[in-house]
């Protein structure tokens, strides 16, 4: 029998059609055994789920805002990895902008001679080389970039020159010309980059954060940029977020900021639809689901 799947919080013909095509049957919440939630904000999520609900698909790749809701009574899946291609593409754009000093050139009003360098041949460290990191490695491959990947356990990552476990992340700060943060936001990764890490980085290094703002100590970054300790920072995420008007980062010439647009709405919905299609089909077939949340790990 086709599993009964509730799509919420609002009716969504596209997602309901995908549920049906993947072998499920759209149903009201009180009759459902699975829930597909399409609102990235948890405010409207039901205070209590029916006991019959055995699986919940969340729309977010990061789950830090859902920690008060996710329980151990059922299986919860995130959209981790679903949005990797578009976020990796945005990351590549930021890396190229850093190397070619595009933000600096755009702000100038006279002819200058910025210290432009090619991205090719550089060492790029990817801290948290999951789905986004792996897609980024593929995009970087034609440029002959040396990639140092950092993962939780340090298992080899295809395309990386070498992979380090998380407890050896300090080795990448003085080595990499570009450091990309792509790790999940957890208690363990809060302020992963602070004053000591920024001081350990090369003076010509760029910090690129496309993960979550909490991974960086913003105050320490502002001070490091002002002092010229690193070449610059490219941030699609900030802490706080949205970044308030008048914040020092807005006027910092070494900072390039994009307003959390690495996963634009059009591609967000398309990718979520594909993740729902995959997981409903897996659930209907009794197969392991993609993106199962590990409560102990925090993602």
Image (cartoon, rainbow, N blue to C red):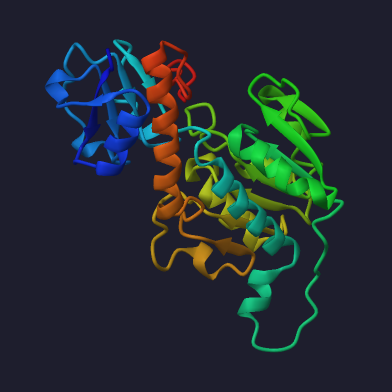
Instruction: Write down the quadrant of residue 289 in the picture.
Output: top left
User: Residue shown at 45%/42% (left/top)?
Assistant: 271
Residue 93, image quadrant: bottom right
In the displayed structure image, the side of residue 167 where residue 56 appears, left or right: left
Q: Is residue 142 visible?
A: yes
Q: Quadrant of the N terminus?
A: top left
Q: Nearer the viewer, residue 225 or 176?
A: 176
Q: Residue at x 80, y 68 (%)?
A: 116
Residue 76, image x, y percentages:
36, 20
Figure label count = 0
Image x and y of residue 269, in percent: 39, 46
52 w.r.t. 299: above or below: above
Residue 63 in view here: no
On the rendered structure, is 79 left or right of 45? right
Q: Give the camera-side residue of 267 and 189.
A: 267
241 in relation to 8, above or below? below
Tell me what residue is drawn at x 69 percent, y 56 percent: 95
Percent coordinates x, y for residue 158 in the rendering? 76, 30
Q: Is 114 situated left or right of 64 in this image?
A: right
Q: Where is residue 8 shown, x and y percent of the image?
A: 22, 35
């Amino acid at each position: 029998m086709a599993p009964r799947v509730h799509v919420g919080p609002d009716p969504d013909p596209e997602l309901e059609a995908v549920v049906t095509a993947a072998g499920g049957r759209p149903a009201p919440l009180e009759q459902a055994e699975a829930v597909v939630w399409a609102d990235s904000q948890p405010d409207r999520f039901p205070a209590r789920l029916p006991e019959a609900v055995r699986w919940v698909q969340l729309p977010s790749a990061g789950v830090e805002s859902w920690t008060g809701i996710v329980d151990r009574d059922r299986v919860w899946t995130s959209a981790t990895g679903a949005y990797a291609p578009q976020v990796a593409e945005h990351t590549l754009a930021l890396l190229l902008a850093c190397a070619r000093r595009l933000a600096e050139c755009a702000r100038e009003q006279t002819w200058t001679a910025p210290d432009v360098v090619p991205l090719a041949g550089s060492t790029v460290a990817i801290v948290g080389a999951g789905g986004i990191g792996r897609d980024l490695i593929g995009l970087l491959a034609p440029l002959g970039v040396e990639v140092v990947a950092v993962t939780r356990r340090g298992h080899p990552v295809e395309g990386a020159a070498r992979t380090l476990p998380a407890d050896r992340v300090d080795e990448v700060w003085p080595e990499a010309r570009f450091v990309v943060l792509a790790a999940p936001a957890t208690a363990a990764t809060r302020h992963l980059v602070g004053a000591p890490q920024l001081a350990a980085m090369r003076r010509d290094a760029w910090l690129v954060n496309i993960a979550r703002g909490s991974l960086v100590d913003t105050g320490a970054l502002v001070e490091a940029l002002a002092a010229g300790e690193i070449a610059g920072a490219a941030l699609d995420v900030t802490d706080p977020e949205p970044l308030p008007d008048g914040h020092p980062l807005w006027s910092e010439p070494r900072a390039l900021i994009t307003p959390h647009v690495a996963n634009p709405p059009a591609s967000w919905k398309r990718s979520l639809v594909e993740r729902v299609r995959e997981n409903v089909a897996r659930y209907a077939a009794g197969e392991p689901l993609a993106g199962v949340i590990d409560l102990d790990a925090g993602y």
